[in-house]
Image (cartoon, helix red, strand yellow):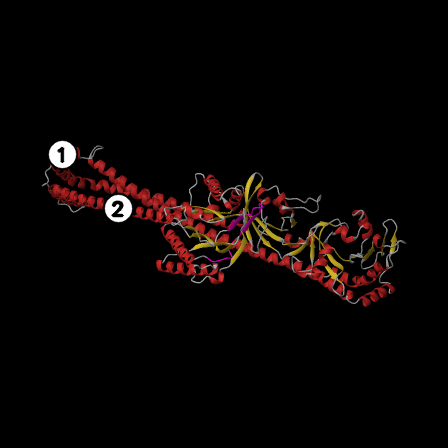
Amino acid sequence: MSEIAGTPPSRWGFSLTSFRAKFVLVVGGAVLVDLLVAGGIALWNVNRLSTNAMDEVGRGLEKANIEYLQNYLETTVERTDLLLDRYHAEVTGLAGSMQTFIDNPALSDKLGQQLQTDGVTTPLTYNQAGNWWQNQAGEASAVTVWGYLLDENKQPTPEAMKTVRESAIFNLVGPSFLSAGPPKLQMYYIGPRANPILRSTPYNDQGSVFDKVYPGHNETNWWDFYFPGLYETWQSWLATPTERPVDSQITMLSPYLDGITGKIIVSFFQPLATPDRKDLNGIVGVDLTLDQLADIVKSVKIAETGFAFLTMSNGNVLAVTEQGEKTLGVKINNESGFDRRLAHSNQAAIASLAMPSTTETVLTNVTLKENGEDVPYVVLLKQLEAENLYTGKVPVTREVMSLGFMVPEHEIYASLIAAKQGISDETRQVVTWQIGTVILSLLVVLSAVFAISGRITAGLRALVEAAQRLQNKDYSVRVAIPARDEVAAVGIAFNRMAEEISYHTENLENLVAVRTKALETANGEINALNAKLKSENLRLGAELDVARQIQMMVLPRRDELDEIKGIDVSGYMEPADEVGGDYFDVLHDDRRMKVGIGDVTGHGLESGVLMLMVQSVARALQEQGDENPREFLEVLNRAVFKNIQRTKTDKHLSLAFLDYADRKMTLSGQHEEVLVLRDNDEVERIDTVDLGFPIGLESDIGPFISTHEFPFDTGDVIVLHTDGVTEAESPGGELFGFDRLCESAKKRRRETADEIKDGIIADLMAHIGTQKIHDDITLVVMKHR
């Protein structure tokens, strides 16, 4: 400072080492920082607004696109459901027509004969190579009577011919239903199990085709050969309609290869009933190819390459475009029937794609590998209406097909990407202009600072001289600066600082003394508070120790237990805290013995006090001579309930008593299970949940109390416990459990009550190991001598 004060005036001109140069550098740097910060904040705000705008636009476009896809999907699902409903309706209509004639067999038979007389139906001709009868080409339907429906003369049985005549109405109604509505492959009638003749329209040489495609079919009943178990399932539905998985008689067959056309088809069957509705009388059905079912799926157009697909609940894709099949990474495997499941896809994301479990639309984002690149896709799935499905074996299951949409994200979000690019371009332009503005502002400010720095340095020289005097402990120094600028403000602040330094220097010793006295007073208060807390802790510890001693004093003594004639009794209780909440007592006189065990909610002082209340009331009632177990518990509960109300605690307890007299035990009250080990090695577990009600919750528990009487004779052992035994945890968190308690007691059943009790406790402690004991542990063992 002295060096500065003695610096010649020439040194205060403008040079690289002068204060003016430093001032220009510092102020210019500060302005630069300020401009950079302000510009940075501005740029940050522009970027933030740009990002927010892109996010807002993105959310709006994404929401609009997703809503469009969802609405499009729901509409397509409705169209698909409507198409399937039309197939159902036509099968139902055909079934209704056939059922009408089945319900009028005389009319049906007469109509069949008339049709044959009129030449509408041709006579059946025997095919010796195939061993079946079939009509000639030209009829509305082909009808075949199989070899197992022929008699020893190779003639159709009368019953089979009767079914042929009665089903002739199919020639009149079948073609009409086939030609109406959506395209179908064929419609047909199959007779009942006894006479499963086959009628199908349009006419085809079905006998020869079936011999070629299905060897051996002519030796086994139609229903057992093609659809094992399905006929019996329909019979069961006829008797009990509620067994149908879906409330419809129509049953869908899994996709399979049609033997006649060689195409993959799906069939819908509806059973027909006898006039009395007690049995089946055949079925009507419709076949449609997957191509026919896929028309709606293939008509879906989403962006450029998006597509739809129809799949079963197991992921078997029924309908999809060729390009969609490639994208999904699946292909048809006909070796085990029609199999084009998503699980077999060469795309891992598609193989793990789950089908919807509810009727809600499910949206999933997946990433597929295409030409070595990751391509994100949006997948939407929605369920169709449920169908009864036969997969080639019973039972018939509930099948819910799903319709899916799949489209690349870059296509569905093309407008979003374009909008974001536009906003990004505008943001870059704003940033460029902002940087130019910051540079221009910096040049203007530096020019102004340089211009005024000379005037400012004059006032600073005066401040330097005053600071040197202040350093030399001249606290009377003051700065006189006539200017009214910022340097003048610094001078005023300097003068005030000098005054405060002078004042505080003079009064520093007084301030130190005051602070020292305040600290001494606070320290004394802290020491007094610590002494008080220590005394309070000692008092509480002593009170808890007294409560624990009182609790342990009221437990049955060894000499009391030894006085009991004929019964060897041993007990153990270990609180989890200083004072426990478990209760057990043995009350006896010359005629009878009463053993009680209970568990107060929680543990600690309040639980211990409630346990002492129960012990006192129970002792008083025993001395009074109340021998009725129900009345005993009722009176005890009323007394404890009133005490709990008085003390305003929220405690209660489970409590059970065993009354022994004349080699019988009477159990009352609700507590843990009672374990009884018989002399003949039998083990009994007695549940007490229905024998009482928690004590202290209600004023009157009489309606809930019940008793259970069981024999207790020579060699029998009874084990009572609280949940602290069975719920004790090992270091690994495994509970000791009732089964371990039973095994521990069983292997010591021949020993004394003390030995049995000690053995169980030893097993329990070994199980607990180093684990902290969280609950009171109480165990009572009684053995009949």
Q: Residue at x 68, y 54 (%)?
A: 396
| Eye-nearest disc, 1 or 2 | 2
Q: Is residue 208 left or right of residue 749?
A: right
Residue 716 seen in the current view: yes
Q: Nearer the viewer, residue 97 or 63?
A: 97
Q: Which residue is mark 2?
A: 535
Is most of the magenta stretch helix, strand or loop? loop
Q: Amino acid at mark 2?
A: Ser
Please check the rendered image and state whether residue 688 is part of the magenta-colored stretch, yes or no.
yes
Along the viewing direction, whichever of 171 and 425 lies nearer the viewer: 171
Q: Position of residue 563 (x, y in %)?
A: 44, 48
- Residue 242 point in image, percent of width and height: 66, 60
Question: On the image, which quarter does residue 247 sit in?
Answer: bottom right
Q: Which secondary structure, mark 1?
A: helix
Q: Is residue 770 left or right of residue 326?
A: left
The answer to whether residue 446 is magenta is no
**Residue found 27% across the figure and 39% down from its top:** 29
User: Residue 97: image x %, image y %?
Assistant: 75, 65
From this view, report whether residue 387 is shown above or below residue 441.
below
Instruction: Look at 38% across and 58% down and name the residue there.
Output: 644
Magenta region: 673-693
The residue identified by callout 1 is: 5
Residue furthest to the front in view is: 590
Task: Tell me the crowding category of disc 2: few under 14, some 14 to 19, or many 20 or more residues within 10 angstroms, Cα based.
Answer: few
Earlier residue among tags 1 and 2: 1
Q: Amino acid at mark 1?
A: Ala
- Binning the other alpha carbons within 10 Å of mark 1 as few (below 14), some (14 to 19) or many (20 upward) gives some
Q: Position of residue 781 (x, y in %)?
A: 48, 47
Query: Which quadrant of the structure image shows residue 455?
Result: top left
- Using the image, tell me which numbered label, if any, was put on residue 356: none
